[in-house]
Amino acid sequence: MQEEMRLYRMDKKIVDYFKNVYYKDDESPKQIREIVEYGKKLGYFYDEMKENHDEAISSLISEIEKINFKKVVNAFLASLSNRDLHLRNPISFYAIARVLPQHGYESFKENKNECHICGCSKENVEDGRFYFYQSYFCGSAYAPDIYLQRYILQKFNESEIKEPKKQDFQILKDIINSLRCATDIELPSQAKNRLKGIDNFKTNDAERRELLDTLGILSILDTKKHPGFLNQFTNSNHTPRKTHSSDWAYPVDFWTGKDGINMDALKFWFGDYDELKELFE
């Protein structure tokens, strides 16, 4: 448990549940009831709440307007050394939400319960366990979910974030410089292995994958044909995949070493830090 630094202050029973029981097909209704009640007592979960698409869009826009850009970038940077995914994932949710057009629900002809613009359902019943899992155990936004985006950004706006440390800036520089060394034919599955030996950057394979997913969402690892979310919104429910079996997020799925680093995106997100100026020289 000591190596799982992002969970260092979390209740052990909750951690064990999400690591060993959650998402298992044999989870019983009794187990669910017991862990939900236990989590509620600790303040981790809350009662299920029904919400519709237009309410969620309105709430999400309100949270975006409250976001302090420097705070969300600081949180991402600070997560690199302390391995706190609760700090690392808001930047990807924010990156998607900031370019999401304000809209009312418009259904697909093929699927009346999916919004044509954002890809979300008309109504949603919030599951406190699912939201908590996505917040603390996942390092990147994985789908166009306005309900989850609102939850993540609301919790982020309510939190206090410490300033990144010297080693956080060094880790990011090492990450970017490692990716710059990727060969032209190198795929994300190969590039993520370059991050294994970076000093003070403790990760597992899933976290390295999620980090590259995030850099794709930020447009730092994208392609001209498949851009990230820096300047436009994309309904990720209907984006192409490089291969049928690929489980990489869009757009990093299409990235290769030949595409390199999108310097405009890198500067947009990290260009205001003197500690990172050598990345732009």
Image: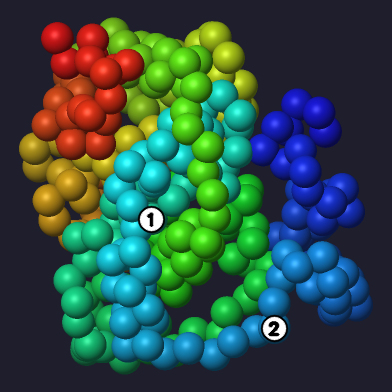
The answer to which of 191 and 60 lies nearer the viewer is 60
Taking the image as shown, residue 213 lies to the left or right of residue 241, namely: right
Q: Residue at x 83, y 33 (%)?
A: 1
Q: Which residue is mark 2?
A: 47
Q: Residue at x 43, y 70 (%)?
A: 150
On the image, which quarter does residue 22 sit in? Answer: bottom right
Instruction: Tell me residue 23's x, y (percent).
Output: 70, 60
Taking the image as shown, residue 133 lies to the left or right of residue 12, namely: left
Query: As shown in the figure, which amino acid type bears the numbered disc 2?
Result: Asp
State whether residue 123 is above or below residue 10.
Answer: below
Residue 93 is marked as 1
Residue farthest to the left, as pictured: 224
State whether residue 179 is above or below residue 231.
Answer: above
Q: Residue at x 73, y 41 (%)?
A: 7
Label 2 crowd (10 A; few <14 / some 14-19 / many >=20) = few
Label 1 crowd (10 A; few <14 / some 14-19 / many >=20) = many
Query: As shown in the figure, which amino acid type bears the numbered disc 1?
Result: Phe
State whether residue 142 is above or below residue 45.
Answer: above
Coloration mode: rainbow
On the image, which quarter does residue 60 sit in? Answer: bottom left
Task: Quarter of the image for the C terminus: give it.
Answer: top left
Instruction: Tell me residue 251's x, y (percent).
Output: 26, 44
Q: Residue at x 24, y 59 (%)?
A: 98
